Image (cartoon, rainbow, N blue to C red):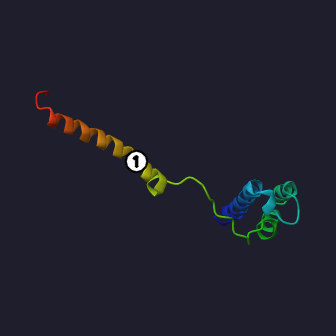
C-alpha cells in the first residue's frame, strides 16, 4: 500500500500543478514565463510541482469580483419587475372584457 501511495501522490501533485499552470492567466504568474513553468513541472515532476505551488503563481492577490455576470432569474430584480409589467396589461384587458359583458346583458 505504501508503494502505491509513493507513486500516486507525486503523480496527482504533478497533474494538479500542470493543469493549474496551464489554466493560470499570464498576469498571475511570477518569476519565469508560463511555458517554462509547464516544462519545469513536466521534466521534474516533484520539484517542479512544489516550486510551482510555492513560487509560480501569485496567490496573494484576490481576484476582482465579477460585475454584470449572470444572475439567476429569481435573484434578478429587473427580471421580476418585467414579470410584473407583463401581467398588468393582461389583467386590464380581462377587466375591460368583464366590464363590457356587464354593460351589455343581451350578448353572451
Dividing the picture into quadrants, the one containing residue 42 is: bottom right
Q: Which of 71/93 is in front?
A: 93
- What residue is shown at x 76% (from left), y 67% (from top)? 53
Q: Residue furthest left?
A: 106
The N terminus: image quadrant: bottom right
Q: Which of 50/87 is in front?
A: 87
Dividing the picture into quadrants, the one containing residue 59 is: bottom right
- What residue is shown at x 44% (from left), y 48% (from top)? 82
Instruction: State the SS at label 1.
Output: helix
Report the residue marked by disc 1. 85
Q: Position of residue 30 (x, y in %)?
A: 84, 65
Q: Which of 86/32 is in front?
A: 86
- What residue is shown at x 71% (from left), y 59% (from top)? 16
- What residue is shown at x 71% (from left), y 64% (from top)? 6
Q: Is residue 88 left or right of residue 7?
A: left
Q: Position of residue 14 (x, y in %)?
A: 75, 59
Dividing the picture into quadrants, the one containing residue 10 is: bottom right
Q: Which of 36/95 is in front?
A: 95
Q: Report the number of numbered marks.
A: 1
Is the residue marked by circle 1 packed among few (<14), some (14-19), or many (20+) residues within 10 Å?
Answer: few
Q: Residue furthest top?
A: 107
Q: Is residue 83 left or right of residue 8?
A: left
Vertical comparison of 43 with 95: above or below: below
The C terminus: image quadrant: top left
Vertical comparison of 56 with 100: above or below: below
Q: Position of residue 105 (x, y in %)?
A: 11, 32
Amino acid at each position: 500500500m505504501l508503494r502505491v501511495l509513493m507513486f500516486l501522490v507525486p503523480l496527482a501533485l504533478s497533474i494538479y500543478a500542470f493543469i493549474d499552470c496551464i489554466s493560470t492567466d499570464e498576469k498571475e504568474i511570477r518569476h519565469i514565463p508560463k511555458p517554462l513553468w509547464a516544462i519545469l513541472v513536466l521534466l521534474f515532476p516533484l520539484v517542479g510541482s512544489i516550486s510551482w505551488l510555492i513560487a509560480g503563481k501569485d496567490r496573494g492577490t484576490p481576484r476582482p469580483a465579477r460585475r454584470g455576470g449572470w444572475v439567476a432569474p429569481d435573484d434578478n430584480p429587473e427580471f421580476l419587475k418585467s414579470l410584473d409589467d407583463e401581467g398588468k396589461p393582461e389583467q386590464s384587458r380581462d377587466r375591460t372584457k368583464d366590464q363590457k359583458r356587464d354593460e351589455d346583458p343581451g350578448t353572451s
